[in-house]
Amino acid sequence: MLPTTRLSDGRRRAIVSAASVVALAALAVGCSGAESPTSPTSANGAYVAPASDLTADITYAFWDETQKAAIEANVAGFNELYPNIKVNLDVTSWEGYWTKLQTQASSDTLADLFWLNGALRNPGGGGVTRRRWRGPR
């Protein structure tokens, strides 16, 4: 068994914050409606940011109430670039989070963006992400 190191709360918040910004930016790219939805690049292969006038209403689900303030700060920064994308935060306790994901995935009401950090597990045997994933659009 490999030794484990417990991250400090500050470092863990920084990692979660960075991951949140990256995830929100990736979601913006996915909502951009660019000519090639699987490749947001120019003819020379350089990254092209999605237009700042995108409009969307998305849900971001996570299980750690203590991270809510940091995520709200990240969303505020994201909304400086994309003011027309409303991000709804859906916080659920750890105890109910995995059951909620499974239920939402089976009823096609899964959040647009959600946490799968910690022990990646398959609580229902069918694969939460496998049922929801429909490939690049």
Image (tube, rainbow, N blue to C red):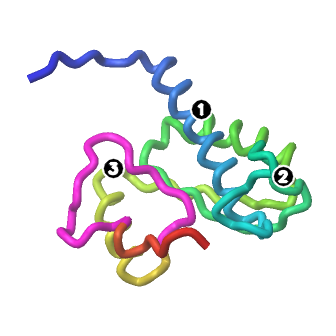
Does the magenta stretch mainly form a helix, a strand or a loop? loop
Measured along the vertical axis of the image, is residue 8 above or below residue 24? above
Identity, as a three-letter code, of the amino acid under mark 1: Ala
Question: How dense is the environment of label 1, judged by Cα within 10 Å: few (below 14), some, or many (20 and up)?
Answer: some
Identity, as a three-letter code, of the amino acid under mark 2: Tyr
Q: Position of residue 7 (x, y in %)?
A: 37, 18
Dividing the picture into quadrants, the one containing residue 84 is bottom right
Q: Earlier in the sequence, mark 3 or mark 1?
A: 1
Contact between labelled residues 1 and 2, with CB atoms less than 8 Å apart:
no
| Residue linked to disc 2 | 82
Question: How dense is the environment of label 2, judged by Cα within 10 Å: few (below 14), some, or many (20 and up)?
Answer: many
| Residue linked to disc 3 | 94
Between disc 3 and disc 1, the foreground one is 1
- SS for dot 1: helix
Task: Tell me which segment is drawn in magenta.
Answer: 110-129
Residue in the image at 72% along x and 65% along y: 31
| Residue linked to disc 1 | 18
Total labels drawn: 3
Dividing the picture into quadrants, the one containing residue 127 is bottom left
- Residue 8 relative to residue 68: left or right: left
Residue in the image at 62% along x and 34% along y: 70
